[in-house]
Image (spheres, helix red, strand yellow):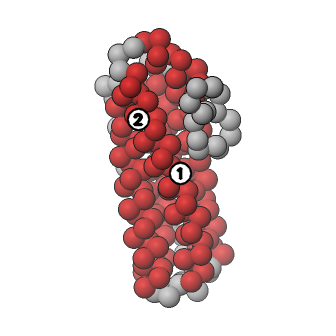
Amino acid sequence: MMSSKVQDAFNEQMKHEFYSSYLYLSMSAYLDAANLPGLAAWMRAQAREEAEHAMKIFDHLLDRGGKVQLHPIGGPPAQFATPREVFDQAHRHEKEVTASINGLYGLAVDERDFASRVFLDWFVQEQVEEEKTSGLLAEQLRMVGDDRPGLLMLDRELGQRRGGASAPPPAGG
């Protein structure tokens, strides 16, 4: 059984993961309204992936005999200035999630909760990929700038994302 400190931290992380899903759904809605269906679909897939992360934590709490506490989730922003702002904000958000996961990992080590530490190894690796991908997409949108054809090409490429894959299509094809 996990300590109450670790249990509380997992419940808080689960809330962060659900918030991430809400945030990416909000971003998807903005991008859809901006007539960028590929970017919107990519964000929607990202939202689904974040909800899956929350459910992994939910299951871990139950598997370890912990108590699941579903905390209120604040509403994410609904308006964004540009698609570039969306992806810049997504990248900043992923860095915040990484810091939170790292803190939880450190707590699991401090509390000698080795089962949770092993469980969190996957999240640590996932965050490396999440930061890499969100940073790459934010940079690509910076490179596109105000070039509408470039934005539409990126939109088309990201619209090809399937399932929960984290990575964008390779550059150049």
Question: Where's residue 137, x and y in %?
Answer: 46, 35
Q: Which residue is mark 2?
A: 138
Q: Is residue 135 above or below residue 34?
A: below
Percent position of residue 94, x then y: 42, 50
Q: Secondary structure at mark 2?
A: helix
- Relative placement, left or right, of 65 versus 148 is right
Residue under the image location 56 percent in, 69 percent down:
121
Closer to the camera in the image, 44 or 148: 148
Residue at 57%, 51% (x, y): give it: 51
Specify few, some or many for label 1: CA neighbours under 10 Å numbering under 14, 14-19, or 20 or more.
some
Q: Quadrant of residue 44?
A: top right
- Quadrant for the N terminus, please: bottom right
- Percent coordinates x, y for residue 42 in the rendering: 56, 33
Q: Is residue 139 left or right of residue 127?
A: left
Q: Are marks 2 and 1 in contact (CB under 8 Å)?
A: no
Mark 2 to mark 1 CA distance (whole Å): 14 Å
Circle 2 crowding by C-alpha within 10 Å: few under 14, some 14–19, many from 20: many
Q: State which quarter of the image contains the C terminus.
A: top right
Residue under numbered circle 1: 129
Q: Give the amino acid at mark 2.
A: Ala
Between 145 and 103, the residue placed more toward the observer is: 145
